[in-house]
């Protein structure tokens, strides 16, 4: 009687086990050559060129993209195109990372020769340090001698997963050594969700004539006109440029009795919640949500009014 094939989930668990064990083996085997590679790449005045053929080429694209977005100028050069003119993209100011599981990928021969001819640093990512690529390279980052996770043991699976993880390790080590921070990340990710999450209050706040501003002795008639004209449902009470209080729709309702005979300073909420221009918009949104308010005035370190950020600004920016 024929046995039933394994369930898809069982196959998946086996794949993840094989690849997970290979990653752990690579972690344990990581040598000082990794530190030397990082030192070399930190000193590169040009770009880090990453290349590979087939599936290794796809991984090379990702490694180059991750490096480029985290402070290390990098690009992928296809080995086939390199042999037909794109070797000119690789200069003596660069360093080259070549990926080949076997270390014998024929299509890499011209790139290897180019790096040797012009004394361009060459880093090999390969399972076989004794291969042609490994012997020609200045540094070798060795992949674990682990089986591929596919049923026939041939399709690049474990090897590409390990290469991808090793590329991430290189990129993260480089960005840490460079002191690459969230602010730098925003410079390279101005669009999409990542850019929105890293936007600062100062980049979206309303300022200047758009701000609803009154003074301590402003009449409530003037205050109501200012609040209506600016459309934020709040007004800042300001003296000598300093934010001294805030008037909200709630303050108006709580003081309806004799409201028009009073001054702005008499009904303002003192010590209002505020934010700073250099605070992330996501953090300001968190303050608004936690306190069930729709707007925050923005002040500098001395309490001088700089602007106003509204919850709608967060919505428009894609944060909320």
Image: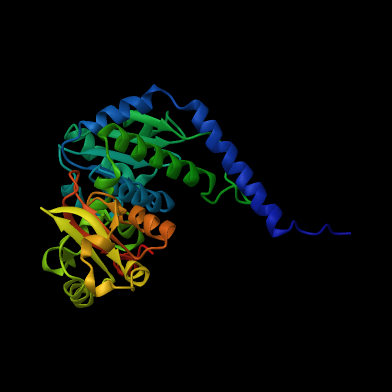
Does any portion of residue 190 appear in the rendered image?
no
In the depicted structure, whether residue 293 falls above or below residue 228: above
The C terminus lies in quadrant: bottom left
Does any portion of residue 47 appear in the rendered image?
yes
Q: How many marks?
A: 0
What percent of the width, then of the height, locates residue 213? 16, 65
In terms of image quadrants, where is residue 217?
A: bottom left
In the depicted structure, whether residue 164 falls above or below residue 200: above
What percent of the width, then of the height, locates residue 93? 15, 37
Residue occupying the point 43% across, 57% down: 290
Q: In the figure, is residue 86 to the left or right of 1?
A: left
Seen from the viewer's position, the closer of residues 192 and 102 is: 192
Seen from the viewer's position, the closer of residues 124 and 285 is: 285
What percent of the width, then of the height, locates residue 82? 24, 51
Residue occupying the point 31% across, 25% down: 36
Q: In the figure, is residue 78 to the left or right of 43?
A: right
Furthest toward the right, the residue is 1
Residue occupying the point 59% across, 37% down: 21
Furthest toward the top, the residue is 32
Seen from the viewer's position, the closer of residues 115 and 170 is: 170
Q: How is the image coloured?
A: rainbow
Q: In the figure, is residue 129 to the left or right of 231?
A: right
What percent of the width, then of the height, locates residue 214? 16, 65
The N terminus lies in quadrant: bottom right
Residue occupying the point 13% across, 55% down: 239
Q: In the figure, is residue 281 to the left or right of 26?
A: left
In the depicted structure, whether residue 253 falls above or below residue 197: below
């Amino acid at each position: 009687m024929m046995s039933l094939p394994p369930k898809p989930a069982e196959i998946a668990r086996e794949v993840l086990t094989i690849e997970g064990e290979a990653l752990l083996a690579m972690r344990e085997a990581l040598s000082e050559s990794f530190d030397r590679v990082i030192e070399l790449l930190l000193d590169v005045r040009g770009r880090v060129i990453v290349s590979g053929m087939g599936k290794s080429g796809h991984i090379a694209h990702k490694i180059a993209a991750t490096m480029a977005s985290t402070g290390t100028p990098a690009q992928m050069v296809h080995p086939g195109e390199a042999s037909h003119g794109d070797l000119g993209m690789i200069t003596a100011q660069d360093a080259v990372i070549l990926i080949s599981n076997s270390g014998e990928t024929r299509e890499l021969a011209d790139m290897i020769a180019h790096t040797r001819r012009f004394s361009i640093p060459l880093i090999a990512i390969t399972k076989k340090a004794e291969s042609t690529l490994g012997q020609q390279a200045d540094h070798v980052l060795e992949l674990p001698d682990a089986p591929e996770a596919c049923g026939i043991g041939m399709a690049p699976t474990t090897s590409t997963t390990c290469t991808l993880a090793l590329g991430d390790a290189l990129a993260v080590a480089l960005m840490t050594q460079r002191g690459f921070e969230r602010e730098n990340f925003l410079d390279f990710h101005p669009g999409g969700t990542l850019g929105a999450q890293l936007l600062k209050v100062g980049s979206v706040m309303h300022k200047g004539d758009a701000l609803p501003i009154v003074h301590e002795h402003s009449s409530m008639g003037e205050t109501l006109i200012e609040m209506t004209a600016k459309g934020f449902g709040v007004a800042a009470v300001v003296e000598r440029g300093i934010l001294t209080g805030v008037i909200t729709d709630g303050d108006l309702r709580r003081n309806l009795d004799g409201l028009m005979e009073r001054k702005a300073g008499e009904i303002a909420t003192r010590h209002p919640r505020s934010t700073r221009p250099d605070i992330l918009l996501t953090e300001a949104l968190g303050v608004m949500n936690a306190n069930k308010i729709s707007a925050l005035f923005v002040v500098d370190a001395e309490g001088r009014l700089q602007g106003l950020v509204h919850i709608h600004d967060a919505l428009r920016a894609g944060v909320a």
